[in-house]
Image: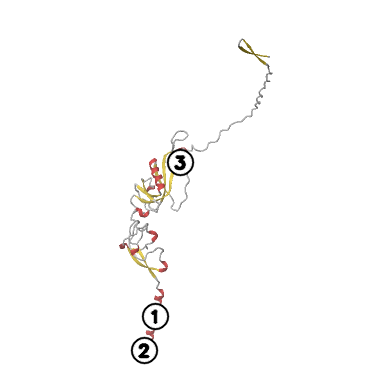
Amino acid sequence: MLVVALLAGVLAIVLASRWLQAQAGAGQMDTADVVVSVVDVPVGTALLPTQLRVAKWPVDTVPAGAFPSIDAVKGRVLTSSLQKGEPILARRLAAEGSKGGLTALLQPGRRAMTVRVNDVVGVAGFALPGTYVDVLVNTQEDQGPDGKNRVISKIVLERMLVLAVAQDVEQDGGKPQLANAVTLEVTPEQAERLDLARSVGALSLVLRNQTESASAATQGATKDLLLGRDAPRPAPTVAVREVAVAAPAAPTTRAAPPARNCVEIVRAGVRSAECF
């Protein structure tokens, strides 16, 4: 009986071991190599091998645009910041050969232009990198019909991306950042308009919704409009009275003078006419 019990125990151990091995084999998944960051990496940074490592990633969940080796991304510049453990993706990298810094954040055909601001113009520090603003200018119009210059406030540029506040290209947890300069992403035409706007008047930034892309078709605000002087006034009431007017008399036609017969007479070399 003792031998039978020992044999039964050994058999149970063998069967349990094989069952556990089979379960472990069934639970294993195919993996792939994916490059991830080992530290927080700020935007505009050229990636270094010390900031990266290769991790095993389930094949079914490998993100699109991931890289299998560190050499494939070494020296590439980030267009958005990375958190520790995030995979390196192609859409978050600047074009090959790009240098680090603000230039890596610019889209093709775009420029970076800086405008001077204060705590009021800069929307109390809430114009952060990555947000969108409208540019408002306060200036004087050319002389109007009354010969006077009118003060006007007008939105001249809409949905401008804030690239940097002072020298900072990252948001600090969404906290307000008071600075004396804001860098905007503009097209060449927008750069010309922005340069003219800051030379003819005072600029203000207007923070706008991140998802709103519709244009605000405004005519600008003037002092007369602000005070209600441009409101249409009712036309004055005029009493109309019918008056009979006599038609002018037709002009009298004179009778043509009767025809006359004339005779030319020469007397002593002097000519004269006699009519009858």
In the depicted structure, whether residue 71 falls above or below residue 212 = below
The location of residue 231, given as percent across then percent down, is 51, 38
Q: Are marks 3 and 1 in contact (CB under 8 Å)?
A: no
In the depicted structure, whether residue 77 falls above or below residue 208 = below
Decide if residue 172 is in sight here: no
Ranked by sequence position, the earlier of labels 1 and 2 is: 2
Query: Neighbour class for label 3 at 10 Å: few (<14), some, many (≥20)?
Result: some
Distance of label 1 from label 2 (alpha carbons) = 23 Å
Residue 18 is labelled as: 1
Q: Are marks 1 and 2 in contact (CB under 8 Å)?
A: no
Quadrant in the picture for residue 195: top left
In the depicted structure, whether residue 161 falls above or below residue 258 = below
The location of residue 258, given as percent across then percent down, is 69, 18
Residue nearer the viewer, 126 or 151: 151
Q: For mark 3, what is the residue? A: 221
Query: Neighbour class for label 1 at 10 Å: few (<14), some, many (≥20)?
Result: few
- Identify which residue is drawn at 38% across, 59% down: 92
Name the secondary structure under disc 2.
Answer: helix
Name the secondary structure under disc 1.
Answer: helix
Residue nearer the viewer, 129 or 48: 48
